[in-house]
Image (cartoon, rainbow, N blue to C red):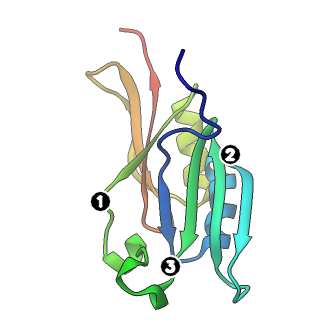
Amino acid sequence: MAEQHPRPPVAPHLSVSNGKAAVDFYKRAFGAVEVMVMSAEDGKRLMHASLTINGGLVMLADEFPEHGDNGLKSPKSLGGSSIIVHLEFKDVDAAYKQAVNAGAEAIMPPQDMFWGDRYGQVKDPFGHFWSMSTPIKK
């Protein structure tokens, strides 16, 4: 039997430009649940936050440019993102609408795709892209 992990063995750790606002946005947009939020010593930024979305773990932190090259940069600082975080929902159309109503930018409205999912994409206010889908029967 495989060893049980207290946390999923792989989880995205996002760098954002306003951690407190990001936590609030992910709650409104994706129904995220706070697991743990730790403020930085300056009281303005987040050192770390752990959230669950659909039972999966997502971690995030504010940028800390004072850490030099080992500090993560947000998509806004980089001028883009190299990843898309994927979420699966029972009703992708409702999830997409909720995300857009919460302030996400509509990138690709949900549509039936050739691989068997109803699939769409949004961009959050912090520069991260999120894809979302619902399996459909063909």
Question: Mark 1 vs mark 2: which is more N-terminal?
Answer: 2
Are the two marked residues, 3 and 2, in contact with CB atoms closer than 8 angstroms? no
Query: What is the number of the mark on residue 82?
Result: 1
User: Which amino acid lies under the numbered mark 2 shown in the image of this protein?
Assistant: Gly
**Three-letter code for the amino acid on which mark 3 is drawn:** Glu
For the residue labelled by badge 1, is the local secondary structure a helix, a strand or a loop? loop
Answer above or below: position of 116 versus 18. Answer: above
Residue that label 3 marks:
63
Q: Assign a secondary structure to mark 2.
A: loop
| Mark 3 crowdedness (10 Å alpha carbons): few <14, some 14-19, many ≥20 | many
Q: Residue at x 49, y 62 (%)?
A: 14
Q: Are marks 3 and 1 in contact (CB under 8 Å)?
A: no
Residue 135: x and y, percent?
Answer: 44, 20
Amino acid at circle 1: Ser
- Residue 110 shows in this picture: no
Q: Earlier in the sequence, mark 3 or mark 1?
A: 3
- State the image coordinates of residue 108 (x, y, percent, origin top left): 36, 46
Front of the two marks 1 and 2: 1
Within 10 Å of disc 1 (Cα), the crowding (few <14, some 14-19, many 20+) is few
How far across and how far down the image is residue 86, in percent?
Answer: 44, 41
Q: Residue at x 39, y 33 (%)?
A: 119
Q: Is residue 115 above or below residue 124?
A: above
Q: CA distance from mark 1 to mark 2?
A: 24 Å
Residue at numbered disc 2: 31
Q: CA distance from mark 3 to mark 2?
A: 24 Å
- Residue 131 horizontal side relative to residue 98, left or right: left
Q: Is residue 40 left or right of residue 77?
A: right
The x and y percentages for residue 94 are: 59, 36
Circle 2 crowding by C-alpha within 10 Å: few under 14, some 14–19, many from 20:
some
- In the displayed structure, 74 sits above or below 118; it is below
Looking at the rendered image, the quarter that the N terminus falls into is top right
